[in-house]
């Protein structure tokens, strides 16, 4: 259809994390009368690759350059910049939306070769991201990341707390960073939550945690709290379900066995539909050390499940309205987690009483339609500045153009 903007959504993989789920939601709900969506990946792998809509072309570095050697560390980032620039030129993309810190760096490099405007999503604490991904000194990595965010048409942080953190850490102009909360599809959550009950044992107190098994999620502190409750306070009815996979799984499994908790902890792996388990749980627990906008808290609110979360920087406090809609405890605090879980076991009605207000809060503040409307406005605003950006690009880099026939 004439007049539609070509939007390329870029992310590293389609693993089963919150960022990848958001990309699927965006690809599904972009207005096809206004936009033609495309997807770029470094590796076409991950649990969610099968959920990419059928009308969305997928371009991946791993398929476009399958036989290329990896001659040095950081090769995929360098190759990704060049290959992404080629895709932008070949497909005549109007605007790019990059998701996750690593892809922001790649997209910033790619758009130096071809002047395509960017909306850069920031979804996690930047200092934590730098320490996790930096291959050079932190200072130089910070300078490089600041430049990548400054060159974006707009930076979209997924919570107010994260927005301020990004502004402060990268010294960005406040008007350059906006808040775009993650999308919450209430109707989809309701439909999937009702699709079948999980095989939870009756008579147990079921705690569910959903997310990548990574140190940032704080699961070791929750495991210590469960150890305290089960082995010292005799709360033998507790059963903790971990929904997800990740690098910390072997360590957690080893600790579960060492603490004698194999009958109280279940590693459920990645589930395409976690909502039925969330709805059936007595408690949703998120013990994270840091977050941007933890999707699972909003999803648990929609499922009317009581919520316990660490009051980590950004996200939980906003979603739970300062603790009015769920219990907040200090991060990395085993005793506080144990006390809150015990309180939920002893006073379930008090915790359940908050759940209806929590759902209404999510429906009011994080509705899918409002979020998509805001995102589409940002994309159109960025694309509207394309001609000016191209003029500046020709002035700064005369003669620099992508020859797409040589990139392959």
Image (spheres, rainbow, N blue to C red):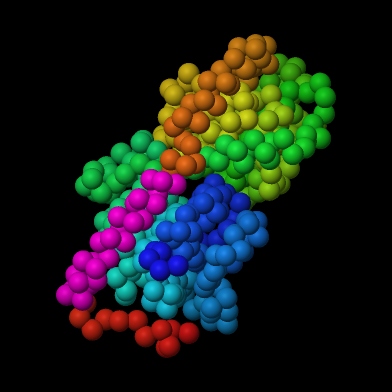
Vertical arrangement, residue 185 with respect to residue 317, above or below? below
Against 146, residue 76 (above or below) is below
Which of 223/179 is in front? 179
Please tell me which residue is depicted at 48% across the width and 54% down the height of the picture: 30
| Farthest bottom residue in view | 406
- Determine the residue positioned at 68% across, 40% down: 192
Q: Residue at x 38, y 66 (%)?
A: 3
Magenta span main SS: helix
Whether residue 336 is visible, yes or no, is: no
Q: Which residues are magenta?
A: 372-396
In this rendering, the answer to whether 169 lies above or below 209 is below
Residue at screen point 30% across, 55% down: 381
Q: Is residue 71 visible?
A: yes
Q: Horizontal and vertical percent for residue 167? A: 28, 44
Outermost residue on the front side: it is: 2
> Along the horizontal axis of the image, is 168 left or right of 84?
left
User: Left or right: 125 with respect to 397?
Assistant: right
Q: Quadrant of residue 101?
A: bottom left
């Amino acid at each position: 259809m004439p007049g539609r903007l070509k939007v390329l959504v870029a992310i590293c993989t389609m693993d089963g994390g919150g960022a990848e789920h958001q990309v699927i939601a965006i690809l599904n709900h972009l207005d096809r009368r206004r936009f033609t969506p495309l997807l770029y990946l470094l590796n076409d792998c991950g649990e969610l690759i099968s959920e990419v809509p059928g009308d969305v072309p997928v371009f991946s570095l791993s398929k476009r350059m399958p036989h290329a050697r990896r001659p040095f560390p950081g090769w995929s980032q360098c190759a990704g910049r060049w290959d992404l620039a080629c895709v932008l030129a070949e497909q005549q993309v109007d605007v790019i939306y990059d998701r996750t810190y690593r892809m922001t760096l790649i997209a910033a490099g790619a758009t130096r070769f071809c002047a395509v405007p960017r909306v850069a999503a920031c979804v996690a604490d930047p200092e934590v991201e730098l320490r996790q991904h930096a291959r050079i000194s932190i200072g130089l990595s910070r300078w490089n990341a600041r430049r990548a965010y400054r060159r974006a048409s707009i930076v979209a942080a997924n919570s107010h707390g994260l927005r301020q953190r990004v502004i402060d850490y990268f010294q960005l102009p406040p008007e350059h960073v906006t808040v775009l909360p993650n999308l919450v599809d209430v109707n989809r959550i309701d439909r999937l939550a009702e699709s079948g009950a999980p095989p939870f044992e009756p008579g147990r107190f079921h705690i569910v945690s959903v997310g990548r098994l990574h140190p940032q999620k704080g699961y070791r502190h929750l495991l210590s709290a469960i150890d305290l409750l089960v082995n010292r306070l005799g709360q033998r009815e507790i059963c903790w379900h971990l929904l997800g996979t990740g690098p910390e799984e072997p360590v957690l499994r080893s600790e579960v066995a060492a603490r004698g908790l194999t009958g109280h902890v279940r590693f459920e792996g990645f589930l395409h539909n976690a909502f039925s388990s969330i709805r059936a749980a007595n408690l949703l627990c998120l013990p994270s050390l840091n977050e941007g906008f933890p999707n699972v808290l909003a999803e648990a609110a929609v499922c009317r499940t009581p919520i316990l979360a660490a009051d980590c920087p950004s996200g939980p406090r906003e979603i739970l309205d300062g603790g009015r809609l769920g219990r907040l405890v200090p991060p990395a605090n085993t005793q506080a987690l144990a006390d809150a879980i015990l309180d939920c076991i002893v006073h379930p009605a008090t915790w359940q009483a908050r759940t209806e207000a929590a759902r209404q809060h999510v429906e009011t503040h994080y509705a899918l339609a409002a979020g998509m409307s805001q995102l589409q406005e940002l994309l159109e605003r960025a694309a509207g500045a394309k001609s000016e950006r191209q003029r500046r690009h020709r002035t700064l880099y005369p003669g620099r153009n992508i020859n797409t026939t040589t990139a392959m």
